[in-house]
């Protein structure tokens, strides 16, 4: 790897070990085995490097979820079965990737005072909506209509973030994939009682 890639790897390591707010330039340089000046040269600032590393780590997570879901859901799976398969993997990562999720919450708080980070998070949300809608629909991302990504994807992203926060705050009573799916069925029955009876 080159220095830039080493720095990203070192920053991801620090995010997992120390979190967003507690990671220093010295921590990253030490983890990457590179001088501190390289951070400024390649990224301009500690924050820019941590932001890039966090977004890369979340992309890695998304790909991991996609692979796990593809392996778990067969071609004959219903949308409901695919949805539970997605949520089984997502909920599992709230414990296996806990430091990453905590770092993402920290970064979200930091974004209030960092317009570039806020822009990057917003762009990540836009992509995340499409990814989540595609996983549920069992279709390639490029085939998801913009309207579907914005509506269905928005609800899925809101659920993801809400369940994540509940899981981080109270791991022992975190919602399961079945809880989420049953809750959505109950919500559908309330919003469309005639449809749920048919």
Image (cartoon, rainbow, N blue to C red):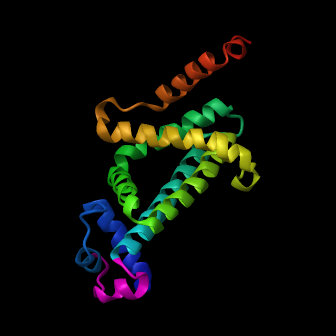
Q: With 134 as the anchor, is 157 left or right in this view?
A: left
- The residue at 50%/37% (across/down) is 159
Q: Percent x, y for residue 137?
A: 69, 41
Q: With 37 as the anchor, is 72 left or right in this view?
A: right
- The residue at 57%/22% (across/down) is 187
The foreground one among 165 and 31 is 165
Q: With 198 as the anchor, is 42 left or right in this view?
A: left
User: Is residue 38 part of the magenta span, yes or no?
Assistant: yes
Is residue 21 depicted above or below 155 in this figure? below
Q: With 82 as the anchor, is 105 left or right in this view?
A: left
- The residue at 56%/26% (across/down) is 184
Number of labels in the image equals: 0
The foreground one among 71 and 92 is 92
Q: In which quarter of the image is the C terminus?
A: top right
- Read off the magenta span: 31-45
Q: Based on the displayed image, in which of its 4 quarters is residue 28 positioned?
A: bottom left
Q: Percent x, y for residue 193?
A: 66, 13
Q: Percent x, y for residue 189?
A: 62, 17
């Amino acid at each position: 790897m080159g220095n830039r890639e080493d720095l990203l790897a070192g920053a991801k390591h620090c995010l997992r070990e120390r979190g967003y707010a507690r990671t220093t330039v010295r921590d990253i340089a030490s983890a990457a085995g590179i001088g501190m000046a390289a951070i400024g040269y390649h990224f301009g600032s500690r924050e820019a490097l941590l932001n890039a590393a966090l977004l890369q780590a979340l992309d890695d997570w998304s790909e991991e979820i996609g692979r796990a879901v593809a392996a778990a859901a067969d071609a004959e799976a219903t949308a409901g079965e695919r949805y539970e398969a997605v949520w089984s993997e997502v909920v599992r990562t709230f414990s296996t990737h806990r430091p990453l999720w905590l770092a993402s919450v920290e970064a979200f708080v930091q974004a209030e005072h960092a317009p570039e980070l806020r822009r990057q998070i917003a762009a990540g949300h836009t992509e995340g909506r499409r990814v989540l809608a595609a996983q549920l629909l069992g279709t390639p991302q490029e085939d998801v209509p913009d309207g579907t990504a914005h509506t269905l994807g928005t609800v899925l992203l809101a659920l993801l973030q809400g369940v994540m926060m509940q899981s981080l705050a109270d791991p022992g009573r975190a919602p399961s994939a079945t809880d989420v799916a049953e809750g959505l069925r109950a919500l559908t029955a309330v919003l469309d009682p005639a449809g749920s009876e048919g």
